Image (cartoon, rainbow, N blue to C red):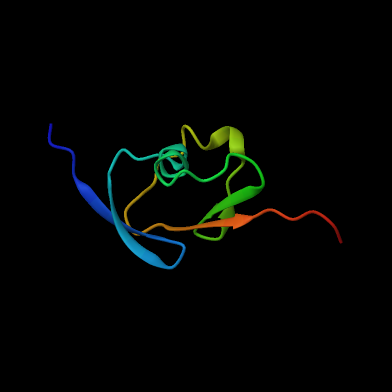
Amino acid sequence: MKIKNMKITLNDRKIDIKDSTTLFDIVSFYKYKKFGFAISVNNVVIPKPEWSTFKIKKNDTIILFQAISGG
């Protein structure tokens, strides 16, 4: 079975990824710090425990942003 590449948007930048990529793969590849940030996919925040199983789909828009607490 051939692994296909697909286009997504990551922090307003178009990139190509493999079709089996997870959010955890993105975090690891780009060496983001494991603490202090959150990830949204198509404007929905994905809980950290789901990152390793959440499969990215073609044309998804992913935003990694610093998590800030307070009011």
Residue 42 drawn at (x, y percent): 49, 59
Residue nearest the observer in this picture, 18 or 34: 34
- Left or right, 15 with respect to 33, comes to left
The quadrant the C terminus occupies is: bottom right
Residue 51 drawn at (x, y percent): 51, 37
The quadrant the N terminus occupies is: top left
Count of numbered circles in the view: 0
Determine the image quadrant of residue 33: top right
Determine the image quadrant of residue 69: bottom right
Write the residue at 46% across / 42% down.
Answer: 23
Write the residue at 60% across / 38% down.
Answer: 48
Write the residue at 64% across / 41% down.
Answer: 35
- Left or right, 32 with respect to 21, comes to right
Establish if 49 lies above or below 44.
above
- Left or right, 52 with respect to 46, comes to left
Write the residue at 51% across / 46% down.
Answer: 32
Q: Residue furthest left?
A: 2
Q: Residue furthest right?
A: 71
Residue 31 drawn at (x, y percent): 46, 43
